[in-house]
């Protein structure tokens, strides 16, 4: 074991503070990584405060990790010391179920092993995330950062990025698709960028008229203000795909009315109970409501490669490690454009 500096929570109300964790010695398939930057996800806040009732303390959050390889195990073939790499939300899975074989490790039948607050499949120890100086991860779950991608701004791609890219790809968004992205936040701003890069006509759907100019700067072709009843009525049945990134419970009906025949609304933001809606809004046009998590390792690498080709990066505010508690407070108020990233050299 190697003692490693980190920041974590020790109880629901403790906030985050410095602590020391142990990283395992290298197994044959392991890659050791010096962490340069780690993105801050809303899930980190929920886990730190045990909002979902399943946190094991001490907790070290962080699953938007970028850095460089410091050492590799004897069986590693794809990486060497000095390579730029990334870790997302998954650090292991069963590797043999149909989901894993189909490169969808995030839906592993036995449950994927999360980057933090999970149990290592070999020794049963708790996994600790990227709010730390280093991490050790099995090679199949390590991603390559293409040359040219800024490391700090690439970090949020590992969760916010793939969470929005995956459903756009899985539902076949491309040239000719009419896509609405609901909510311009950490997820929504990436959804706009990816939908545009895939060739769709992109509309930003927001409650805030003042966000319109920012949405268009990010690539949106149009802006639809959801509080404008006349505009919403005029947009009835005008979308093939809606990416719903709103992070809290919200009414679905106004958005479902925007779907065209055989259209799909995909939820990626809210992990919550949502209000009921009249099923006629779907039955009368063969509409669908779907959900999507992150993508698998292969699809995440595909996304990173596309980002390098198209120059797609997250909009970030880089913070020092000791600014994380203030960042959590600001994140709750949506006071960030559009993602916090921790500079781990400040740890």
Image: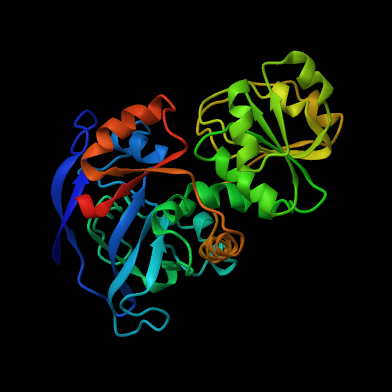
- Figure check: 167 above or below 100: above
Q: Image point 57% across, 58% down: which residue?
A: 311
Horizontal side of residue 347 vs 334, given as left or right: left
Q: Image point 29% across, 60% down: which residue?
A: 35
Q: Image point 34% across, 80% down: which residue?
A: 80
Residue 233 pos. (x, y %): 81, 19
Tell how many labels.
0
- Figure check: 47 above or below 164: above
Which coloring applies here?
rainbow
Q: Image point 31% across, 47% down: which residue?
A: 342
Pick the residue in front: 77 or 229: 229
Pick the residue in front: 187 or 223: 223
Residue 106 pos. (x, y %): 50, 56
Say if residue 324 shows up in the picture.
yes
Residue 99 pos. (x, y %): 57, 62
Residue 22 is drawn in which quadrant?
Answer: bottom left
Pick the residue in front: 73 or 33: 33
Horizontal side of residue 48 vs 185, given as left or right: left
Residue 46 is drawn in which quadrant?
Answer: top left
Residue 163 pos. (x, y %): 54, 48
Say if residue 208 shows up in the picture.
no
Pick the residue in front: 314 or 90: 314
Q: Quadrant of the N terminus?
A: bottom left
């Amino acid at each position: 074991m190697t003692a490693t500096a980190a920041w974590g929570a020790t109880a629901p109300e403790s906030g985050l503070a410095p602590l020391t964790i142990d990283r395992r010695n290298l197994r044959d398939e392991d890659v050791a990584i010096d962490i340069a930057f780690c993105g801050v996800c809303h899930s980190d806040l929920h886990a730190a405060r045990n909002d979902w009732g399943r946190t094991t303390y001490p907790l070290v959050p962080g699953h938007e990790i970028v850095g460089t390889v410091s050492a590799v195990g004897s069986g590693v073939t794809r990486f060497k010391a000095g390579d730029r790499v990334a870790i997302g939300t998954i650090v292991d899975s069963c590797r043999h179920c149909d989901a894993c074989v189909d490169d969808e490790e995030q839906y592993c039948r036995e449950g994927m092993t999360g980057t933090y607050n999970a149990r290592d499949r070999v020794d049963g120890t708790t996994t600790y995330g990227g709010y730390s100086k280093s991490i050790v991860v099995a090679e199949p779950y390590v991603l390559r950062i293409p040359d040219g991608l800024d490391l700090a701004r690439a970090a949020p791609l590992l969760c916010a990025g793939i969470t929005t890219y995956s459903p756009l790809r899985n539902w076949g968004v491309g040239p000719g698709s009419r896509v609405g992205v609901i909510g311009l936040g950490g997820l929504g701003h990436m959804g706009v960028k990816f939908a545009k890069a895939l060739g769709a006509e992109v509309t930003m759907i927001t409650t805030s008229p003042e966000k319109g100019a920012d949405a268009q700067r990010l690539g949106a072709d149009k802006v639809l203000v959801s509080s404008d009843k006349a505009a919403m009525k005029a947009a009835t049945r005008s979308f093939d795909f809606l990416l719903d990134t709103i992070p809290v419970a919200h009414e679905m009906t106004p958005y479902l009315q925007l779907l065209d025949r055989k259209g799909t609304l995909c939820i990626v933001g809210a992990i919550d109970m949502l209000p009921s809606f009249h099923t006629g809004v779907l039955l009368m046009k063969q509409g669908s409501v779907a959900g999507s998590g992150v993508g698998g390792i292969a699809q995440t690498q595909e996304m990173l490669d596309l980002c390098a080709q198209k120059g797609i990066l997250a909009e970030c505010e880089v913070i020092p490690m000791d600014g994380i508690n203030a960042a959590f407070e600001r994140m709750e108020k949506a006071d960030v454009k559009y993602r916090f990233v921790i500079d781990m050299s400040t740890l």
